[in-house]
Amino acid sequence: MLLDDLLRRRLVILSGKGGVGKSVVGTALALAARDRGKRVLLIEIDTPVSAARFLGANPSLGHAETEVLPGLFMANLDPRTVMDEYVRETARVELIARKILDNPVYSKFFAAAPGLPELMVLGKIMILEEERVGWPRRPRFDLLIVDAPATGHGLSFLKVPLAASNAIPVGPVGHNARRILSLLRDPERTALAVVAVPEEMAVVEAIEFADNAHKELGIETRALILNACHERRFTAAQEMEVLALAAADVPGRLAPGVPAAAALTAARHHIRRRKLTQFYMKRLKKAVDAPIVPLPFLFDERLTKASLQLLADRLEAA
Amino acid sequence: MSAEGALLDALAHRRILIVSGSGGVGKTTTAAALALRAAVQGRRVLVCTIDPSRRLVTSLGLETLSDRAREMDIRRFDPVAGGRMWAMTLDTKRTFDTLVERHTADAVARRRILDNRFYKQVSSALAGSHEYMAMEKLLDLAADERFDLVVLDTPPTRHALDFLEAPDRMMGFLDASVLRWFLKPYFVAGRLTLKVATRTGAFFLKLADRVLGLQFLQDLSEFFLAFEGMYAGFKERAQQVNEVLRAEDSGFVLVAGPSALTLDEALYFHERLIERGMPFIGFIVNRLHPAATGPGGRGGAPDIDDDLGDRLVEVFKDYSRLAKAEMKNVARLEEETGTVPVLVPELEGDVHDLDGLHEVGDLIFGGARPARRGRTRARSAAAVATRAVAARGAR
């Protein structure tokens, strides 16, 4: 249901506060779409360690699209490389391009100009979205999933095309900024999904983000993905009992190597987190008009393809 | 000195404390908790977030927070005489405007900048401006005599690095060669023409038009021209920031979570700090899960029915697997950096007010840890975590 709606578009942008597991959610979403037979590209932006590692692929994934699993591609976009590509394409002649690229002014300008790296990356995403191959022409990728930078910077990331199109009314930069903006705003082509975890700050930021995306950019949030949810593991009566016992300092063991007191502490921890999960779920529901999809907290020491597949199946079932 | 000791010492004597780390590790909460602790101990402390998402607002339990320092009421914590605490957040646009006002000679020059279309976007909306303005604000605060200590909360790792590099980038940009290029007369309004003296000049201009657009370059050029005369000041400020970041009475606290991923990021940041010769104080590893060890475990089975018992065992196994993995990660951090981090257990609730922050301070500094009484302080990571978790359980 959720996937039906999200995957109607070809561009899905995931945003959220840092540390909420956007790259995990992005990978799970990519797996789920791939399971539906789609050709998917998961785009990360200038990340030191790529989500490719979850799928057992090389974590120092490069800038170019790499097929990590059959039908699942990943790319770790480097803004500077995108800019270089743009210069090469515009200059057409390698010798001339080299002259520009080797000029120290070019490097310094790119490093210091606020917004330029973001604009370049979004431009590249637009080009990938528009790319067609074969005959009859069909999209090169059925779905692009973008793991956008963390929220505070996330909105400013999405804001760049608007700012650029306001600042530069004419010329190629302004023109491209407007094209990007209309892609982001087109509900038929682009879906925005906000990722959060059931914690105060992440939830506040998710709400703020959805709000600002609507007010300042005119982009609607299509889904809220609540990651790392603690799901119920005891009945209501058992929860009461656990809380009472945890306060009572129970001696003895529940099983070999399982002291009752330690197990009760862990259980109490779980119950409090579960209640918080429910609390924040309600709060999100009230504040944002979009379907909420909970994903479970994973206890795995290392995330593997199996754990990601579990999340993908949850997304499919949502 | 122990990790807690080094932190306490920094809170008591340093002037600038920069709290950094990747997202979701409780960095903002930690920054605010450290500031509160220093204030309670008698210093006049300001905590400032440069994170544009303004998380500090939530952890202080406030509805709004502005770029004006706002005093918190900390009387209930019984502070040492003179101890006060303020909080504020960075307003990029306003900081930029203030900067312009300060450096322009007259009202005409000021308006020329403030009304510039390019300036309006750069100063308020664009990603990247935050770092420059944070750097500007830091200088202001470092010189502000109202405060003995400024605790600076920073954006997640990647961007915090941007912050460290902002002064160098700014200086590179203000480098004469870059500016000369943008200040070439053919970009300037009214003289926008392709009549350039040399053929190569004309050729590159055409190219620039194709890549970026002449109008854009002209706007940019005007923008830079408007700032003419301020560059020397800018450059000097950037240089000063570099000095403040490296000063003896400044210090960096790196906050991480116990997962391999966030610890990797902390390690990366630590390396960069050392490389740049910036003063590092210590690591704080937040959110450790309850350890799998603890008192009890002897004697017969307690009076718990089978179904509940089974579920408890399952939950216990999940948590102990997690806790073990986390301790392994922490041990790796110790090994690779040769420092012992301060370990803080995950809270069962969320922190969103001053009382909560005060409790976090207790967890960081062990103020409420019965396990410490009458014992030699354990130094190994595992022992510290067990102690912290046991203390939390006891509260």
Image (cartoon, rainbow, N blue to C red):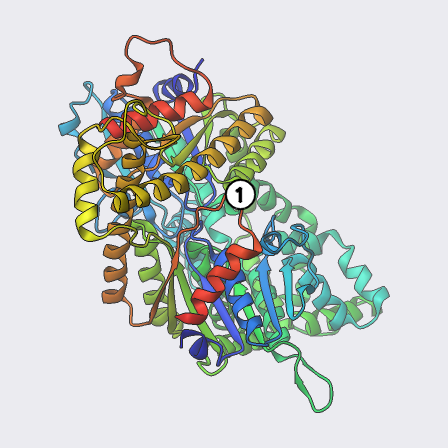
B380 and B98: which one is in front?
B380
- Badge 1: few (under 14), some or many (20 or more) residues near its Cα, within 10 Å? some
| Residue B30, quarter of picture | top left
Secondary structure found at label 1: helix
Q: Chain of mark 1?
A: B
Q: Is residue A186 above or below residue B232?
A: below
Residue B54: horizontal and vertical position, in percent?
Answer: 34, 50
Residue B46 placement, left or right of A171: left
Q: Is residue B255 above or below residue B81?
A: below
Residue B270 placement, left or right of B84: right
Give the quarter of the figure containing the C terminus of chain B: top left
B239 and B202: which one is in front?
B239
Q: Residue furthest left?
A: B76
Q: Residue furthest right?
A: A95
Residue B352 placement, left or right of A301: left
Q: How many marks?
A: 1
Q: Is residue B257 above or below residue A98?
A: above
* Residue A124 visible: yes
Badge 1 amino acid: Leu
| Residue A251, quarter of picture | top left
Q: Residue at 31% x, 15% y: name it.
A: B372
Q: Residue at 40% x, 31% y: name it.
A: B142
* Residue B257 visible: no
A306 and B189: which one is in front?
A306
Residue A233 placement, left or right of B283: left
Q: Residue at 52% x, 22% y: name it.
A: B339
Residue B386: horizontal and vertical position, in percent?
Answer: 37, 25
B202 and A6: which one is in front?
A6
Residue B146: horizontal and vertical position, in percent?
Answer: 29, 29
Residue A146: horizontal and vertical position, in percent?
Answer: 54, 65
Per the image, the residue denoted by label 1 is B261
| Residue B277, quarter of picture | top right
